[in-house]
Image: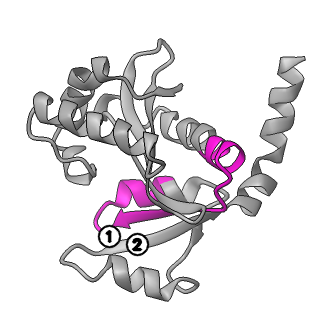
């Protein structure tokens, strides 16, 4: 479901992200497959430097369908960015990918908070975030950060996922995974 980013998959991912229903909401707005390849190379370098962590989301057959990344990493926190190709949306991949990625961030990389910055008009992403039992609205508890992300032309909603809430709400899933592993 998640794998390390690979330069060989960039053309396929570019074809998915360039869809008009996806492109406005991606962070890496490449205008060609070559530009997306270059951006992915940079992202892989940033991961080696500890500035970001990025994974490819795959479908049930291992085909790339989107990406999930944490950007602006600082002091055990960062901003989550996820996109999934239009034809794969609404099939449960978003929730599964977030669960696996957050598990990796909180337990392998010792993150304590993951923020979600979602454009105000992106109702689909806001609804998807609010379906997750470990997501909290962060506007009131992080007013300075909320003001900072809304200082420009685009306006955002701010959410957060604290490690302790993620741990509490996903404990039953971890127990099931352990049982299956036995």
Give the side of residue 89 with respect to residue 42, left or right.
right
> Distance of mark 2 from mark 1, alpha carbons?
6 Å
Q: Is mark 2 on a helix, strand or loop?
A: strand
Q: Is 90 covered by the magenta stretch?
A: no
- Identify the residue position indicated by label 2 in the image: 157
Q: Which mark is residue 75?
A: none
User: Which residue is drawn at the image coordinates 28% and 75% (left, top)?
Assistant: 155
Percent x, y for residue 92? 52, 35
Q: Nearest the camera: 31 or 21?
A: 31
Q: Is 113 covered by the magenta stretch?
A: yes
- The correct choice, above or below, for 20 with respect to 121 in the image is above
Q: Quadrant of residue 63?
A: top left
Percent x, y for residue 33? 13, 29
Percent x, y for residue 56? 42, 30
Residue 89 seen: no
Q: Nearest the camera: 58 or 148?
A: 148
User: Which residue is drawn at the image coordinates 67% and 57% (left, top)?
Assistant: 133
User: Which residue is drawn at the image coordinates 27% and 83% (left, top)?
Assistant: 151
User: Which residue is drawn at the image coordinates 90% and 17% (left, top)?
Assistant: 182
- Identify the residue position indicated by label 1 in the image: 120
Residue 116 seen: yes
Hey, which residue is sitting farthest top in the picture?
61
Count numbered badges in the picture. Answer: 2
Q: In which quarter of the image is residue 136?
A: bottom right
Q: Which range of residues does the magenta coloring cover?
A: 102-128
């Amino acid at each position: 479901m998640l794998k390390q980013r690979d330069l060989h998959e960039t053309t396929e991912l570019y074809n998915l992200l360039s869809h008009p229903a996806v492109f406005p909401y991606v962070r890496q707005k490449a205008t060609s497959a070559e530009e997306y390849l270059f951006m992915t190379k940079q992202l892989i370098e940033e991961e080696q430097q500890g500035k970001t962590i990025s994974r490819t989301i795959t479908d049930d057959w291992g085909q790339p369908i989107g990406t999930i990344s944490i950007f602006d990493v600082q002091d055990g926190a960062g901003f989550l960015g996820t996109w999934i190709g239009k034809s794969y949306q609404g099939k449960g991949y978003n929730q599964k990918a977030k669960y696996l990625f957050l598990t990796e961030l909180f337990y392998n990389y010792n993150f304590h908070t993951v923020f979600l910055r979602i454009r105000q008009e992106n109702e689909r992403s806001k609804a998807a975030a609010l379906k997750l039992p470990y997501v909290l609205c962060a506007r009131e508890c992080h007013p300075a950060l909320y003001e900072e992300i809304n200082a420009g032309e685009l306006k955002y909603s701010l959410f957060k996922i604290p490690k302790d809430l993620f741990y509490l709400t996903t404990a039953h899933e971890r127990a099931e995974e352990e049982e299956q592993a036995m």
